[in-house]
Amino acid sequence: MAGLDPEFTELPLRTLADAALQRAADLGATHADVRVERIRTGSHALRDGELERTVDDVVLGLAVRVVHDGAWGFAAGITVTPDAAAVLAEQAVATARVSAPLTSRRVELAPEPVYADATWVAPCERNPFAVSESERIGRLRELSARLLASDGVDHADARVTFVQENTFYADLAGSSITQQRTRIDPEFTALSVSDAGFSSMRTVGPPTGRGWEYLTGIGWDFDAEIAELPELLAEHVKAPSVEPGRYDLVIDPTNLWLTIHESVAHATELDRALGYEAAYAGTSFATPDQLGTLRYGSELMNVTGDRVTPHGLATIGWDDEGVAAQTFDIVRDGVLVGFQLNRQMAAEQGLPRSNGCAFADSPGHIPLQRMPNVSLQPAPDGPDTAGLIDQIEDGIYVVGDKSWSIDMQRYNFQFTGQRFFRIRNGRLAGQLRDVAYQATTTDFWRSLRALGGPQTWLLHGAPNCGKGQPGQIAPVSHGCPSALFTGVNILNTRTDGGRA
């Protein structure tokens, strides 16, 4: 397993933090925290086996956040010396002093235990940056060549992005935490150009908190998926267009994760529900006054938030406010029971503790409330996916995510996918084209009639969830089983404008 990167740990982390925290305390800050971050991002992109782009980028910086006279102050820089850290503390306090007269409510933070000299390193068998560039590009070329050698595949795209994120956090209370996590996001697309038009089909392997071992068969079998992709594409090219109407759906985790992300995870961010994100990302239909009463979905629906699931994109030891990773309920037995919080919102709501949902995407940004891994739980004794399909006389099986649309309150939505299979009498009966499913959030989740068992559960996700002004991105995973929904409205994207 990869250990802490010496290029990070050889920095004077403790000295930097001490300089900033001491200066903030001398200036009267009631809270101060310091983050030193080094984020290295690599990527390769190939078109028809030829390299089009390669990136190896490093961001290194220092951030100081304070509460002074009941107001937030923040400053960040790229000079990592004790003197520079002390100056950042001065700038953060100066910002708080300007903000204090404009602050309608004094900042209070929910308490959190002190974690002194704590360390957390995500599991990673082969750090992608320790793998030679020739080996990385060679693997992408190898899989691209297999696609291009198949009948009906005219072009092949391959890309992979990989990130190593190192963070040191310290605060006036006495916590000092060093962390490292690695993530990787591969994707391969086969394209066909024929008399039937332009068609594409891509892999559905999820981004994950792993290293280069992921592309060699540990955690996902890309070789097997590449082998089946040309046949799936050929069938898609010839598939009939869907007849609009109401259908029962079996939705695969490779598609359902995105519906969870947009209609549940974003909707239960408390800052959004309170209106803090209205100017940029919208609000939420799931408002705090409905906590404990809103019937979000059927009684089968149990959704949790966590930062502890192995290989999750949002999995971490502590968040960017020094709050330890934990698991909490968001929807229980179909009822809204919890929101995602940071320390300030937890205190404002009269709660004893944050549930660890603060994150900043770089040392130059202040931490925001960001979603953890938000996951739909399987039925403990539920069937496999074939068992769910067997329950449907006339319906559609949905695999892989593609385009989506949802309103600013996370209520009315429309999703497409990579692959749609007609279900007749409990069996798959060929692919369909031009399919989108449309619903309101509560109608959709209330139509949940059956869940697959743990054997169908998959952790998928997105590396680039956007939020905030200035904008930030965050990696997040969503686990879910296969699931059966009844009477969902199906649109034909060709007749309604656009194509799936």
Image (cartoon, rainbow, N blue to C red):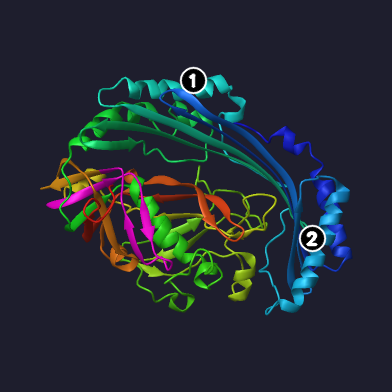
Q: Is residue 257 magenta?
A: no
Q: Which residues are magenta?
A: 392-419
Q: Which residue is mark 2?
A: 172
The amino acid pointed to by label 1 is Gly
Give the amino acid at mark 2. Answer: Leu
| Residue 114 or residue 290, whichever sits in front | 290
**Residue shown at 59%/72% (left/top)?**
351
Q: Which mark is residue 138?
A: 1
State whether residue 275 is above or below residue 234: below
In front: 233, or 474?
233
Q: CA distance from mark 2 to mark 1?
A: 48 Å
Count of numbered labels shown in the rendering: 2
Q: Position of residue 389 (x, y in %)?
A: 19, 48
User: What element does badge 1 sit on?
Assistant: helix
Figure check: 441 above or below 222: below
Q: Say which element carries label 2.
A: loop
- In the image shown, does 437 or 371 lie closer to the viewer? 437
Quadrant (top left, top right, bottom left, bottom right) of the N terminus: top right
